[in-house]
Amino acid sequence: MIHLRDLLAEITLGSIAPYATQFVWQPMGSTDQWKCAVTADNHNIEFVMVHGENNEWYFAFTLPTRNRNVHTAMGGRTTSHMKSGAVGQLNYLRLIRTAGEAILDFCTNHAPEAINISGADSDADKESQKTRLYAAFVRDNASRLSAAGYSTMQRGDQLWIVRNSNADATGTK
């Protein structure tokens, strides 16, 4: 049986085409929460950034739940691909590549201090799997992250993108 982590050692997310490369981030009531939506294979995917303490941000993507009549705390959306209505209909690696592109876009346009890009999922194994996929994306796009002024940092089982330096509009640190 081939495991996804073994496949990741052989393929790169850089060779996979994302569903989207352009994103329009909109505030969700305040500038402490931002979201953007992408349609992929007739499924509405929302990428969400939530501002936490110490100027840190948290990233997740959500999909509509399988049973659209069931309302969850997230309004009928889920962070779990397996609980979504898109099971077997979306290319998961393309979805993760698109999520990575959305994260880079948010960094470029909003200059956050740090973003926790650990995989959010109700299943701990899936959460760990998403984190490994994001790590593969970051590894494949290290030069793009560096050009945007960011690097990665591992804190325990958490994966972060951290801004290298602060500068005002004139470039002064």
Image (tube, rainbow, N blue to C red):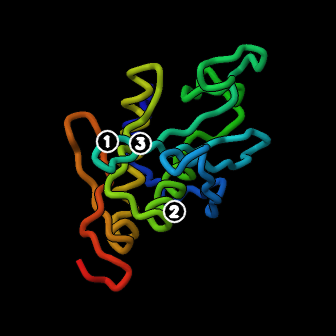
Question: Which amino acid is tagged 3?
Answer: Tyr
Q: Quadrant of the C terminus?
A: bottom left
**Of the residues under marks 1 and 2, which one precedes in the sequence?**
1
Q: CA distance from mark 2 to mark 3?
A: 15 Å
Q: Position of residue 22 (x, y in %)?
A: 64, 63
Eye-nearest disc, 1 or 2:
1
Labelled disc at residue 117: none
Q: Residues within 10 Å of mark 3 (few under 14, many from 20)?
A: some
Question: Which amino acid is tagged 1?
Answer: Glu
Q: Residue at x 67, y 25 (%)?
A: 75
Q: Which residue is mark 3?
A: 58
Residue 125 placement, left or right of 76? left
Q: Residue furthest front?
A: 30
**The image quarter in which residue 87 lies:** top right
Q: CA distance from mark 3 to mark 1?
A: 10 Å
Q: Position of residue 95 (x, y in %)?
A: 59, 45
Labelled disc at residue 53: 1
Q: Secondary structure at mark 3?
A: strand
**The image quarter in which residue 126 lies:** top left
**Of the residues under marks 3 and 1, which one precedes in the sequence?**
1
**Of the residues under marks 2 and 3, which one precedes in the sequence?**
3
Eye-nearest disc, 2 or 3:
3
Q: Which residue is mark 2?
A: 105
